[in-house]
Image: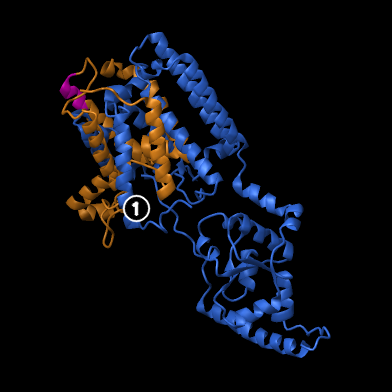
Chain colours: A orange, B blue
């Protein structure tokens, strides 16, 4: 698998340009966790619509006369991320079904931890109204206090607990 | 002037735009190597600083771009979405996510990228993310008060710190350059041959850093475009060098009575004064609203003469000059301001003969105009107040 990635400064510059273009054209920034939320809301509404409507959390997104939560900006954007990521993998010969993990971690264990990490991110992003892309990165670009607070909380905590997770990666 | 949503780009087209921008986002993320959990986790263990470099560079690039576009009036910075702060939920949520980063090795955006190229751990992360949202939603009543607590609104970080926007921009750039320098130094010490930045000679690094810092210093001195332009046109020297075309009250009255479509009255008085008494068909626009996108349409029609009406001529002259500086054309100010128009036409005070042979006609005209215009004003009031075309605020976030 080809691991010749782009120079990080250049990649960061391009990422900044994509974000800038997004703000310039649409007036909003990028995001990711919101799309996952929309999928979950749609699923809950599909399985138990009454429960969804009555819930304080799901209720704002579903109900009679409301459009599907999947017909939102973020869902379309994340669909694009899927496509874009795939295209990049295709162009750079990185398409491969594989499980990546630290040297001391087995595949099933890695799957478990990935799922737990994802769940933590999914829940945490609700509290913070966004993840590293939506709240932190986009927030920093527009100089919002929320952006910087969230960024510092994510990375600060990450560094604080890194020691306890060292067996996962080192 | 950006943003182009929702006027030029409809909400439907915006979805297509989202898809295209997402493709760019995903492509760059994967090109940067963010589809690899080991690479992402590296920033926390010091063996790979890609995350720091990409993240900081992207934030600084986008921030600088927004500031520069805003300064040149190409982007309406008041119209863009600023994510609001719920202080403690942001901290707690961020902390939870920080743990998730160490445990999972991804964040939502990068996990989607990884899943896209076949990384099974990325797929598990996305699945886990959905479970996380589900748990959050089901247990929501337990903490919904906390979720809504410490809501501070869309505050800006430099306001929270009590410094100017330009100074903060420079500080962020300085911190970024410093972080790059420190991490490059650490990499050299650890002897990582494969790190891409080591292909740069040290002098190239210093020069790049110095260049970026210099650009950053410019931001400190970047004046707020609004304040800068307003002070420029308020300068008496400027005003004397740029006289504005004037329209007499009689002429305006005639054009109102005649229902002339190619005249638009721009009333710059305070909303309270406007609500009390205003000329028919006039738009109430304050000076600060000249800069944004809200009123571009009525102001930019070149065949329509925009007559600026204020309390006095100086106020009108400043407004006219400002509009001209912003590129608008075909402007005029009302001689004597609203006060004189009110006195001569609307209030019915006794006609002051000038001794010309037209006095009789002018007197008659003014009386007729008075009744007509007052009737028009009353009709407008009955129809309901004309709401200023307030743009729907752009929604963003997650």
In the shown orientation, is residue B174 left or right of residue B200?
right
Q: Chain of mark 1?
A: B
Q: Is residue B148 visible?
A: no
Residue at image point 65% right, 61% down: B320
Q: Quadrant of residue B350?
A: bottom right
Q: What is the magenta range?
A: A106-112
Q: Main secondary structure of the magenta part?
A: helix
Q: Is residue A163 above or below residue A16?
A: above
Q: Within the image, what quadrant is residue B5 found in?
A: bottom left
- Report if residue B396 lies within the magenta region: no
Residue named by callout 1: B14
Q: Residue furthest right?
A: B355
Residue B195 spot, x, y in % from top left? 36, 17
- Residues B237 and A128: in front is B237
The image position of residue A96, as x and y in percent, is 17, 28
Q: Is residue B43 visible?
A: yes
Q: Which of these two is toward me, B389 or A68? A: B389
Label 1: few (<14), some (14–19) or many (≥20) C-alpha neighbours in 10 Å:
many
Magenta region includes residue A109: yes
Above or below residue B55? Residue A75 is: below
Residue B246 % position (x, y): 70, 69
Q: Dividing the picture into quarters, in which one does residue B328 lie?
A: bottom right
Element assignment for label 1: helix
In front here: B213 or A146? B213
Q: Is residue B74 left or right of residue B130?
A: right
Against B84, is B188 above or below? Answer: above
Instruction: Say whether residue B259 is left or right of residue A23.
Output: right
Residue visible at 40% across and 19% down in the picture: B197
- Residue B244: x and y, percent? 69, 63
Give the quarter of the figure containing the C terminus of chain B.
top left
């Amino acid at each position: 698998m080809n691991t010749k990635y782009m120079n990080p400064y250049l990649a960061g510059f391009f990422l900044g340009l994509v974000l800038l273009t997004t703000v310039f054209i649409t007036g909003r920034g990028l995001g990711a966790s919101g799309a996952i939320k929309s999928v979950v809301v749609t699923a809950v509404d599909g399985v138990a619509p009454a429960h969804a409507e009555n819930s304080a959390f799901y209720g704002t997104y579903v109900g009679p006369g409301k459009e599907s939560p999947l017909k939102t900006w973020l869902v379309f954007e994340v669909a694009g991320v899927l496509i874009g990521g795939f295209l990049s993998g295709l162009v750079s010969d990185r398409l491969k079904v594989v499980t990546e993990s630290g040297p001391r971690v087995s595949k099933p264990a890695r799957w478990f931890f990935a799922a737990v990490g994802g769940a933590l991110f999914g829940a945490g992003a609700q509290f913070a109204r966004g993840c590293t892309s939506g709240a932190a990165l986009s927030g920093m670009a527009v100089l919002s206090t929320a952006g910087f607070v969230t960024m510092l909380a994510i990375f600060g905590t990450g560094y604080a607990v890194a020691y306890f997770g060292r067996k996962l990666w080192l | 002037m950006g943003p182009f949503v929702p006027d030029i780009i409809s909400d439907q087209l915006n979805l297509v735009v989202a898809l295209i921008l997402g493709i760019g986002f995903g492509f760059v993320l994967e090109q940067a190597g963010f589809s690899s959990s080991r690479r992402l986790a590296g920033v926390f263990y010091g063996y790979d600083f890609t995350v720091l470099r990409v993240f900081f560079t992207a934030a600084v690039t986008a921030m600088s771009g927004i500031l520069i576009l805003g300064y040149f009036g190409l982007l309406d910075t008041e119209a863009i979405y600023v994510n609001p702060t719920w202080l403690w939920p942001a901290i707690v949520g961020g902390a939870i996510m920080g743990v998730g980063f160490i445990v999972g090795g991804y964040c939502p955006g990068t996990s989607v990228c990884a899943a896209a190229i076949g990384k099974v751990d990325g797929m598990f992360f996305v699945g886990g993310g959905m479970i996380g949202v589900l748990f959050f939603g089901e247990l929501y009543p337990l903490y919904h008060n906390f979720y809504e607590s410490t809501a501070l609104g869309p505050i800006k970080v430099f306001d929270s710190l009590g410094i100017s926007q330009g100074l903060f921009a420079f500080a962020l750039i300085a911190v970024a350059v410093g972080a790059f320098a420190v991490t490059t130094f650490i990499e050299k010490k650890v002897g990582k041959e494969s790190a891409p930045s080591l292909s740069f000679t040290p002098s190239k690094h210093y020069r790049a850093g110095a260049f970026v810092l210099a650009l950053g210093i410019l931001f400190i001195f970047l004046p707020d475009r609004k304040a800068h332009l307003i002070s420029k046109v308020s300068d008496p020297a400027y005003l004397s060098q740029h006289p504005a075309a004037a329209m007499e009250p009689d002429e305006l009255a005639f054009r109102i009575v005649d229902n002339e479509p190619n005249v638009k009255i721009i009333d710059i008085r305070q909303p309270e004064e406007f609500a009390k008494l205003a000329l028919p068909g006039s738009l109430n626009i304050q000076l600060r609203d000249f800069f944004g996108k809200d009123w571009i349409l009525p102001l930019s029609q070149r065949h329509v003469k925009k007559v600026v009406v204020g309390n006095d001529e100086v106020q009108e002259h400043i407004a006219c000059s400002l509009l001209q500086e912003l590129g608008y054309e075909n402007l005029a100010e009302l001689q004597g301001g609203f006060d004189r128009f009110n006195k001569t036409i609307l209030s019915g005070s006794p006609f002051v003969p000038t001794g010309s042979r037209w006095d009789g006609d002018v007197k008659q005209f003014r009386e007729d105009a008075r009744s007509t215009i007052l009737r028009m004003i009353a009709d407008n009031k009955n129809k309901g107040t004309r709401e200023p075309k307030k743009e729907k605020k752009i929604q963003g976030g997650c």
